Amino acid sequence: MIFWQHILEKLQDNQKVYVLTVIENFGSSPGRKGFKMLVAQDGFIFGSIGGGVMEFSLVEETKQLLKEGIDNIFIKKQIHKGNIKDGSGMICSGEQTVAFHCLDSHHISTVQGILTGIQNGEKGTLSLTPDSFYFSYKFIENQFEYKINSNNDWFFNEHVGYKETLYIVGGGHVGVAVSELFVKLGFFVVVFDNRENLNTLKNNHSAHQKQVVDYADISNYILEGSSSYVAIMTNKYTDDKLALSKLIGRNYTFIGVLGSKAKLETMWNVMLKEGFTQEELDRIYAPIGLSIKSESPEEIAISIAAQIIKIKNTNN
């Protein structure tokens, strides 16, 4: 978000800004798809497209374009194999293609839209083409979609905003620790509890959204889809069971329940008698988190994060 804030400040200052975006990479290229850098008219730079002599060279080239008043859109391939055609001067192997877009005051509304979407936890798409740089609230399932047919025939779409949302059911001490960690990991974090005036919920300053709800209606507040992750950690067994019973069988990438093996075994037996199937229960991650002998809320948060990261990155 800081990247876009810097761009907005420069545009509002009536400066032109080049945005350099890695739109394709292969092998051991230091720049990966989506890496970005801004070069402003006053010489300010921010971000990275891979570093090293390659980045320095492209930044100097961009500064010269701004100095000469050139505002073209173009792409440039960099091959990291030494002194060859399109070579970057780096020897790390691999290659990357960088798109150059010059923004001016006419793009202020576009950048403001990106910032608003990120702040509100909305999902959108940044679309780059040889003719345009624009943002929409269209949702793409993958982080990137792109195709390069030639220097004048290409497109690059990038998911902007929080791709994954973690819904925490239970606003206690563990919920606070989990919120803090997952915000740092780039998740949009929503916390629910059914208790009014709960101190730990009020003092949870990390979560993007907090809400007091009736757990009987919890399914109304959690969006289904591959970007949704659910961690149930209420303050008592009956609430855990109630929340799970309303969410089980719905389409989420992850549902986990915090608790001891003994508590969960009791819950499973009761739910089987109530008509839930073993197949449904087997899809639940319980006890939630990797087994690392975690005890404190912070250690439990790390175990949950490790488990969810593994699932998220395996699915990707």
Image: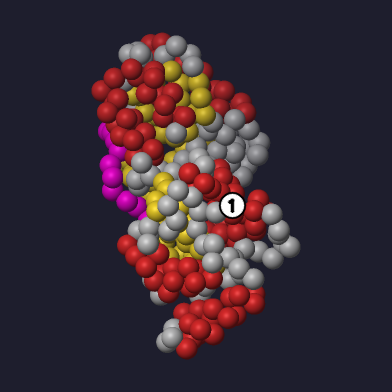
The reply to whether the magenta stretch includes residue 141 is yes
Q: Nearer the viewer, residue 174 or 52?
A: 174
Q: Which residue is mark 1?
A: 173
Q: Is residue 56 above or below residue 87?
A: above
Please provide the residue range marked out in magenta: 129-142
Q: What's the amino acid at mark 1?
A: His
Residue positioned 44% across, 68% down in the render: 243
Counting from the top left corner in percent of width and height, residue 87 is at: 56, 32
Q: Is residue 62 left or right of residue 185?
A: left
Q: Is residue 310 visible?
A: no
Counting from the top left corner in percent of width and height, residue 231 is at: 51, 61
Q: Nearer the viewer, residue 292 or 207?
A: 207
Q: Is residue 83 above or below residue 149?
A: above
The reply to whether the magenta stretch includes residue 192 is no
Q: Is residue 151 above or below residue 235?
A: above
Counting from the top left corner in percent of width and height, residue 308 is at: 56, 59
Q: Of helix, strand and loop, which mostly describes the magenta segment?
A: loop
